[in-house]
Image (spheres, helix red, strand yellow):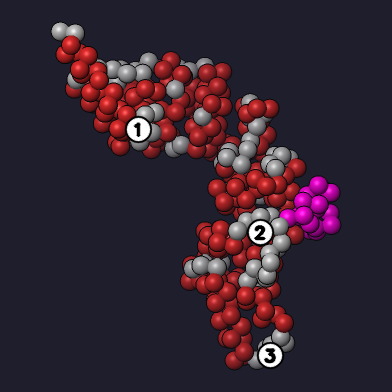
């Protein structure tokens, strides 16, 4: 079992220097200042105190009990230790509540064996600055329920092999990629893009420019957007290579409507010019193109 004293010096110092609450993170902690009886009737009172604790954190207690039955027998002190751990790494109490509500299994986790190793990995292996840790966790709370050995470290190794190093290193904005399965999620997306006729180097460059590509669904995102691009827009794959952000725009909400408006008036635009601007800017550009068309007749 990992203990705080066994954490690398850098991590331990950062923990000790992290912001401390001006008062106890949870008012429920005061419950431990009194010696409570353990009779059957008092067991119900203790359980109710845990429910109130969750409610104060805005955690759905019914959901927590359903998804983590062990919560029923976990002492309140254990719940408080989880909150203290997350708070010590700079995560705001309001965010802690959202995180625990999303992943109730964290309520019964052991900070020393379950949580500290993850923070240690992010700090010392991924090299996320301490002050950016809260951004990483709030952006992707699932990091806290992933195994460092079985999930996070293999994903980091794969991503670095792709080129996520140096100026392209993983940051607090891209740590969510670490929760993706290499064989089940990351690699299939690389292979799908290659199957379109793009070289491996082309695909890697696209992914490094737009890391979100590795988070999109092949079935719900890639396939319909590629189909529309090739069949309706008669697009060139090289344009996707130049503007991989195409896949981040809504097919029904932006791509189709704008493309159809252009076709309706006999115009065309590069993907970046068609999609990057706001609706107002796009409409203004369309009006300008129509006026120029009329003046040129």
Residue at 70 percent across and 47 percent down: it is 130
**For the residues marked 3 and 1, what is the alpha-carbon distance in whole angstroms?**
63 Å
The label nearer to you, 1 versus 2, is 1
Is 69 or 270 nearer to us in this picture? 270
- Please tell me how crowded label 3 is: few (under 14), some (14-19), or many (20+) other residues with Cα within 10 Å: few
44 to the left or right of 227: right
The label nearer to you, 3 versus 2, is 2
Q: Give above or below for 45 relative to 276.
A: below
Instruction: Please give the label number shown on residue 278.
Output: 1
Q: Which residue is mark 2?
A: 86
Please, what secondary structure does the residue beneath circle 2 have?
helix
- Please tell me how crowded label 2 is: few (under 14), some (14-19), or many (20+) other residues with Cα within 10 Å: many
Main secondary structure along the magenta-highlighted residues: helix
Q: Which residue is mark 3?
A: 37
Dot 1 or dot 2, earlier in sequence = 2
Is 88 or 201 nearer to us in this picture? 88
* Circles 3, 1 touching at the beta carbon (< 8 Å): no
The quarter of the picture where residue 229 lies is top left
Q: Give above or below for 235 relative to 89.
A: above
Is 30 or 215 nearer to us in this picture? 30
- Please tell me how crowded label 1 is: few (under 14), some (14-19), or many (20+) other residues with Cα within 10 Å: few
Residue at 57 percent across and 51 percent down: it is 138
């Amino acid at each position: 079992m990992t203990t705080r004293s066994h954490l690398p010096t850098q991590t331990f110092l950062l923990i000790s220097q992290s912001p401390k609450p001006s008062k106890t993170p949870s008012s429920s902690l005061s419950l431990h200042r009194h010696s409570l009886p353990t009779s059957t009737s008092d067991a119900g009172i203790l359980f109710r105190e845990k429910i109130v604790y969750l409610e104060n954190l805005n955690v759905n207690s019914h959901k927590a009990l359903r998804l983590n039955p062990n919560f029923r027998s976990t002492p309140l002190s254990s719940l408080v230790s989880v909150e203290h751990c997350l708070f010590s790494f700079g995560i705001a109490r309001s965010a802690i509540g959202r995180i625990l509500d999303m992943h109730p299994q964290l309520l019964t986790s052991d900070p020393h064996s379950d949580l500290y190793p993850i923070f240690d990995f992010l700090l010392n292996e991924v090299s996320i600055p301490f002050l950016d840790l809260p951004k990483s966790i709030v952006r992707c709370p699932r990091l806290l329920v992933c195994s460092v050995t079985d999930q996070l470290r293999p994903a980091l190794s794969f991503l670095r092999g792709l080129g996520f190093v140096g100026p392209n290193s993983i940051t607090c904005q891209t740590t969510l990629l670490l929760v993706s399965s290499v064989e089940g999620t990351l690699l299939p997306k690389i292979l799908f893009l290659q199957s379109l006729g793009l070289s491996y180097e082309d695909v890697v460059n696209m992914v490094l420019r737009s890391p979100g590509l590795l988070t999109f669904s092949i079935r719900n995102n890639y396939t319909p957007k590629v189909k529309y691009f090739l069949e309706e827009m008669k697009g060139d794959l090289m344009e996707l290579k130049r503007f991989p952000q195409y896949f981040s725009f809504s097919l029904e909400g932006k791509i189709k409507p704008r493309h159809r408006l252009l076709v309706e008036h006999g115009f065309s635009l590069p993907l970046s010019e068609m999609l990057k601007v706001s609706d107002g800017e796009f409409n203004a550009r369309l009006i300008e193109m129509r006026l120029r068309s009329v003046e040129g007749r």
